[in-house]
Image (cartoon, grey):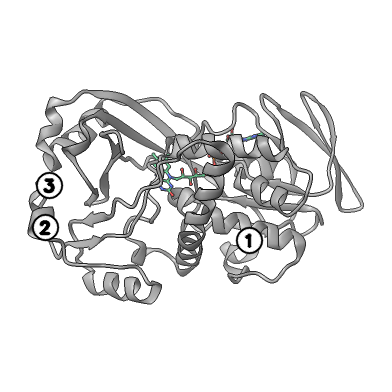
Amino acid sequence: MLVAYECRLAGASVTLIEKNWVGQESSWAGGGILLPIYPWRQAEAITQLVIQSHKIYPELIAQLQAKSGIDPEFIQSGMLICQNPDFNDAIVWCQQNGIAYESPSEELLGSVCAEMQQPLWLPEIRQARNPRLLKAVHATLKVMGVKIIEQCEVQAFEITNSRLQSVLTSQGRLPVDELVLAAGAWAGEFWQQYFNLGSPCEVQVAPVKGEMLLYAAKPEALNTMVLDHGRYLIPRADGHILVGSTVEYAGFDKSLNSQTHSELSQFATRILPDLASFPVVKHWAGLRPGTDLGIPYIARHPEISNLSVNAGHFRNGLTMAPAAAQLTLDLILKRKTAIALQPYQLESVH
Ligand SMILES: Cc1cc2nc3c(=O)[nH]c(=O)nc-3n(C[C@H](O)[C@H](O)[C@H](O)COP(=O)(O)OP(=O)(O)OC[C@H]3O[C@@H](n4cnc5c(N)ncnc54)[C@H](O)[C@@H]3O)c2cc1C
């Protein structure tokens, strides 16, 4: 949806084709933390998109909120990272990227029951309430005149002279000037089915399931996001607390596991014992668009001249989305890019 937003802002006439309903898949299911967990352990290509998006987000949110009237709850709730065996790497990463860091106060440390190892407090890290952010983007696209076709199955493409001419869908034939594949966890199989054309360049994206829990707690129960041994708590403005998440390689399967439910709730009540007195009101799973290193593909097809891809953001799709969408537009318009494109190309990912 953000690619559609950027293209429309640039003056293009945009149609978004969605096989189900927009904003219901991974982007809905995620936690909305706007920082990778342990960002200093990630590839530089991820940092580039994260930091650029960090700069874009405040103005983007203001625009979306103004155009849609929907508050995406973009909140600077900060993040407490309980264990940092690679503390020096963390500090260097924060310094190099202009991310504020502090030693957590005694009060903050006392607010959670976690074993601490060189804890780190990142006070300026933000979150967005992703289902609301998606509603805000969706409503903004409508206001801007983007045509959104839901429940629309792609059935075939007409390709002549190395150009996509049209897409045949369950709702008819649509002419194509430029096409961007942004199908999340489905992008790999979609590419394989329609665009592989014997080329050595593939989009290798596979689904990686993540399960989450939601507690209906009170607003004062927790004030900051907490990361402990790879799992996290995210407090929303109204007191709900998200607990995440699992990383499961289980194909396109979103079924829920009672064992996972109890592991996540044990984690949550260990960190915040008061949560035991609040109900779990939701348990769900989403399918991340998984890639080996978590680096998305933002690239042109090597042979089809008017086809691009923006997919494979794995665990950091919301965090990287604004910069990734702008980069996609730059690529289409052959503009100078704020970030070097090379790491996101099809060839270099393999
Ligand atoms: C449990 C969990 C926690 C997460 N936490 C965070 C977090 O805290 N921060 C963060 O930055 N990221 C997080 N993520 C990752 C983030 O959600 C994803 O990287 C991101 O949502 C990917 O966005 P996307 O638009 O590529 O995919 P999606 O949001 O999945 O959208 C892809 C869309 O394409 C549609 N589609 C697929 N195939 C077709 C087709 N053939 N025709 C038409 N439409 C099609 C789908 O129906 C879907 O609507 C999390 C993910 C999960 C599952």
The yes-or-no answer for disc 1 within 8 Å of ligand 1 is: no
- Taking the image as shown, residue 148 lies to the left or right of residue 207, namely right
- Helix, strand or loop for disc 1: helix
Locate the N terminus by quadrant. top right
In this view of the protein, can residue 267 be seen by the observer? no
Work out whether 267 lies above or below 180: above
Residue 112: give its label.
3
User: Looking at this view, is 108 or 328 the one in front?
Assistant: 108
Amino acid marked by disc 2: Met
User: Looking at this view, is 269 or 225 the one in front?
Assistant: 225
- Helix, strand or loop for disc 2: loop
Residue at image x 41%, y 46%?
74
Q: CA distance from mark 2 to mark 3?
A: 10 Å
- Taking the image as shown, residue 252 lies to the left or right of residue 85, namely right
Locate the C terminus by quadrant. bottom right
Work out whether 59 lies above or below 267: below
